[in-house]
Image (cartoon, rainbow, N blue to C red):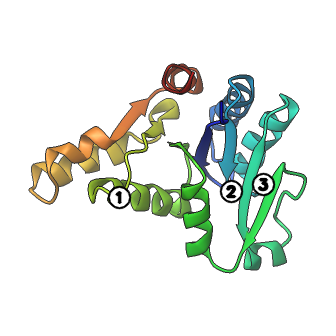
Protein backbone atom coordinates (compact mmCIF):
# COMPACT_ATOMS: atom_id res chain seq x y z
CA UNK A 1 0.00 0.00 0.00
CA UNK A 2 1.28 3.45 -0.93
CA UNK A 3 1.90 5.68 2.06
CA UNK A 4 -0.59 8.53 2.34
CA UNK A 5 0.64 12.06 2.94
CA UNK A 6 -0.81 14.86 5.02
CA UNK A 7 0.07 18.46 4.25
CA UNK A 8 0.28 20.57 7.38
CA UNK A 9 0.04 24.33 7.02
CA UNK A 10 1.14 26.11 10.19
CA UNK A 11 3.01 29.05 11.59
CA UNK A 12 6.72 29.74 11.31
CA UNK A 13 6.26 31.16 14.80
CA UNK A 14 4.97 29.37 17.89
CA UNK A 15 2.28 31.89 18.84
CA UNK A 16 1.22 33.01 22.29
CA UNK A 17 -0.34 29.78 23.58
CA UNK A 18 1.84 26.81 24.62
CA UNK A 19 -1.01 24.56 23.47
CA UNK A 20 -0.14 25.40 19.85
CA UNK A 21 3.29 23.76 20.13
CA UNK A 22 1.85 20.89 22.19
CA UNK A 23 -0.68 20.18 19.44
CA UNK A 24 2.00 20.48 16.74
CA UNK A 25 4.08 17.92 18.57
CA UNK A 26 1.08 15.62 19.06
CA UNK A 27 0.18 15.92 15.38
CA UNK A 28 3.71 15.16 14.17
CA UNK A 29 4.01 12.17 16.50
CA UNK A 30 0.55 10.91 15.58
CA UNK A 31 1.17 11.18 11.83
CA UNK A 32 4.31 9.07 12.19
CA UNK A 33 2.53 6.50 14.36
CA UNK A 34 -0.26 6.24 11.78
CA UNK A 35 2.31 5.79 8.98
CA UNK A 36 1.22 9.05 7.37
CA UNK A 37 3.97 11.14 5.75
CA UNK A 38 4.21 14.77 6.84
CA UNK A 39 4.30 17.26 3.97
CA UNK A 40 5.04 20.81 5.08
CA UNK A 41 6.97 23.98 4.35
CA UNK A 42 10.40 22.63 5.42
CA UNK A 43 10.90 25.24 8.12
CA UNK A 44 12.91 24.54 11.25
CA UNK A 45 11.23 27.31 13.25
CA UNK A 46 7.92 27.83 15.02
CA UNK A 47 5.16 25.26 14.72
CA UNK A 48 6.66 24.05 11.45
CA UNK A 49 9.83 22.93 13.16
CA UNK A 50 7.90 21.46 16.07
CA UNK A 51 5.64 19.28 13.92
CA UNK A 52 8.57 18.07 11.81
CA UNK A 53 10.84 17.24 14.76
CA UNK A 54 8.00 15.31 16.43
CA UNK A 55 7.35 13.31 13.26
CA UNK A 56 11.05 12.55 12.92
CA UNK A 57 11.44 11.55 16.58
CA UNK A 58 8.56 9.09 16.12
CA UNK A 59 10.20 7.59 13.04
CA UNK A 60 7.94 9.23 10.47
CA UNK A 61 8.63 10.23 6.90
CA UNK A 62 8.91 13.97 6.24
CA UNK A 63 8.61 15.84 2.95
CA UNK A 64 9.60 19.49 3.16
CA UNK A 65 9.32 22.11 0.45
CA UNK A 66 11.02 25.48 0.75
CA UNK A 67 11.65 28.33 -1.69
CA UNK A 68 15.23 29.41 -2.35
CA UNK A 69 14.79 32.83 -0.74
CA UNK A 70 13.97 31.16 2.60
CA UNK A 71 16.96 28.82 2.25
CA UNK A 72 19.04 31.98 1.91
CA UNK A 73 17.67 33.07 5.32
CA UNK A 74 18.87 29.71 6.71
CA UNK A 75 15.54 28.65 8.19
CA UNK A 76 15.23 25.37 6.30
CA UNK A 77 15.20 21.97 8.01
CA UNK A 78 17.55 20.00 5.79
CA UNK A 79 17.55 16.64 7.62
CA UNK A 80 14.14 15.61 6.27
CA UNK A 81 13.37 12.40 4.41
CA UNK A 82 12.73 14.52 1.30
CA UNK A 83 13.85 18.16 1.03
CA UNK A 84 12.75 20.08 -2.06
CA UNK A 85 13.90 23.60 -2.92
CA UNK A 86 11.67 25.59 -5.24
CA UNK A 87 12.22 28.88 -7.02
CA UNK A 88 9.09 30.63 -5.73
CA UNK A 89 6.45 30.53 -3.02
CA UNK A 90 3.83 29.70 -5.66
CA UNK A 91 5.82 26.66 -6.76
CA UNK A 92 6.26 25.65 -3.11
CA UNK A 93 2.49 25.65 -2.52
CA UNK A 94 1.88 23.64 -5.66
CA UNK A 95 4.51 21.00 -4.82
CA UNK A 96 3.22 20.67 -1.25
CA UNK A 97 -0.39 20.35 -2.34
CA UNK A 98 0.28 17.95 -5.21
CA UNK A 99 2.18 15.63 -2.84
CA UNK A 100 -0.58 15.22 -0.25
CA UNK A 101 -3.84 13.38 0.25
CA UNK A 102 -5.31 15.72 2.87
CA UNK A 103 -4.61 19.11 4.43
CA UNK A 104 -4.45 20.06 8.11
CA UNK A 105 -4.28 23.76 8.95
CA UNK A 106 -2.84 24.52 12.38
CA UNK A 107 -2.66 27.99 13.92
CA UNK A 108 -0.60 30.32 11.80
CA UNK A 109 -0.48 33.69 10.15
CA UNK A 110 -0.81 35.16 6.68
CA UNK A 111 1.12 32.33 5.02
CA UNK A 112 -1.11 29.67 6.55
CA UNK A 113 -4.20 31.62 5.50
CA UNK A 114 -2.83 31.97 1.97
CA UNK A 115 -2.25 28.22 1.74
CA UNK A 116 -5.65 27.41 3.21
CA UNK A 117 -7.56 29.73 0.91
CA UNK A 118 -5.77 28.48 -2.17
CA UNK A 119 -6.66 24.87 -1.28
CA UNK A 120 -10.22 25.91 -0.39
CA UNK A 121 -10.65 27.85 -3.64
CA UNK A 122 -9.34 24.94 -5.70
CA UNK A 123 -11.81 22.66 -3.90
CA UNK A 124 -14.67 25.09 -4.53
CA UNK A 125 -13.76 25.12 -8.22
CA UNK A 126 -13.78 21.31 -8.36
CA UNK A 127 -10.03 20.97 -8.92
CA UNK A 128 -9.61 18.44 -6.09
CA UNK A 129 -11.53 16.51 -3.46
CA UNK A 130 -8.90 16.39 -0.74
CA UNK A 131 -10.24 16.92 2.78
CA UNK A 132 -9.22 20.10 4.58
CA UNK A 133 -9.15 20.16 8.39
CA UNK A 134 -8.86 23.24 10.59
CA UNK A 135 -7.05 22.22 13.76
CA UNK A 136 -8.81 24.75 15.95
CA UNK A 137 -6.58 24.69 19.03
CA UNK A 138 -8.26 26.60 21.87
CA UNK A 139 -10.61 28.23 19.37
CA UNK A 140 -7.83 29.85 17.34
CA UNK A 141 -9.76 29.55 14.09
CA UNK A 142 -13.18 30.51 15.53
CA UNK A 143 -13.10 34.02 13.97
CA UNK A 144 -12.24 32.45 10.61
CA UNK A 145 -15.12 29.98 10.86
CA UNK A 146 -17.40 32.92 11.69
CA UNK A 147 -16.07 34.79 8.65
CA UNK A 148 -16.71 31.84 6.35
CA UNK A 149 -20.28 31.63 7.65
CA UNK A 150 -20.59 35.39 7.08
CA UNK A 151 -19.37 35.03 3.48
CA UNK A 152 -22.02 32.39 2.82
CA UNK A 153 -24.74 34.35 4.63
CA UNK A 154 -23.97 37.48 2.60
CA UNK A 155 -24.23 35.57 -0.69
CA UNK A 156 -20.58 35.52 -1.74
CA UNK A 157 -20.31 31.72 -1.63
CA UNK A 158 -22.62 28.77 -1.78
CA UNK A 159 -23.27 26.95 1.50
CA UNK A 160 -21.27 24.03 0.09
CA UNK A 161 -18.14 26.06 0.86
CA UNK A 162 -18.63 25.20 4.52
CA UNK A 163 -18.67 21.48 3.69
CA UNK A 164 -15.12 21.66 2.33
CA UNK A 165 -13.57 22.40 5.73
CA UNK A 166 -13.85 20.25 8.83
CA UNK A 167 -13.30 22.09 12.11
CA UNK A 168 -11.53 19.85 14.65
CA UNK A 169 -10.63 20.83 18.23
CA UNK A 170 -7.32 19.03 18.64
CA UNK A 171 -4.66 16.78 17.12
CA UNK A 172 -6.22 13.64 18.60
CA UNK A 173 -9.49 14.34 16.76
CA UNK A 174 -7.89 15.02 13.39
CA UNK A 175 -5.62 11.99 13.76
CA UNK A 176 -8.60 9.74 14.50
CA UNK A 177 -10.33 11.08 11.39
CA UNK A 178 -7.23 10.60 9.24
CA UNK A 179 -6.73 7.04 10.50
CA UNK A 180 -10.34 6.17 9.63
CA UNK A 181 -10.01 7.72 6.20
CA UNK A 182 -6.61 6.31 5.23
CA UNK A 183 -6.36 2.99 7.08
Distance between mark 3 and mark 2 Cα atoms: 5 Å
Disc 3 versus disc 1: nearer the observer: 1
Q: Could you tell whether 6 is left or right of 87 in the image?
A: left
Q: Which residue position holds label 1?
A: 127
Which x, y percent locates residue 123?
34, 53
Residue 56 lies in quadrant:
top right
Depicted 84 relative to depicted 119: above or below: below
Label 2 sits on a secondary structure element that is loop
Residue density around tag 3, few if under 14, some if 14–19, many if 20 or more, within 10 Å: some
- Residue 12 shows which numbered tag? 2
N-terminal label among 2 and 1: 2
Viewer-proximal residue among 143 and 62: 62
Residue at x-position 74% and y-position 51% = 63
Q: Which residue position holds label 3?
A: 45
Label 3 sits on a secondary structure element that is loop
Distance between mark 3 and mark 1 Cα atoms: 31 Å
Residue at x-position 66% and y-position 48% = 39
Q: Could you tell whether 133 is left or right of 61 in the image?
A: left
Q: Are marks 3 and 2 in contact (CB under 8 Å)?
A: yes
Residue density around tag 2, few if under 14, some if 14–19, many if 20 or more, within 10 Å: many
Amino acid sequence: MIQKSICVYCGSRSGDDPAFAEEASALGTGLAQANLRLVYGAGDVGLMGTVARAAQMAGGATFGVIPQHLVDWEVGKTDLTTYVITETMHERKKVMFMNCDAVVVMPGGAGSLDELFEALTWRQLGLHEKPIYLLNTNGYWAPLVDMLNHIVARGFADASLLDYITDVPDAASVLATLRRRFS
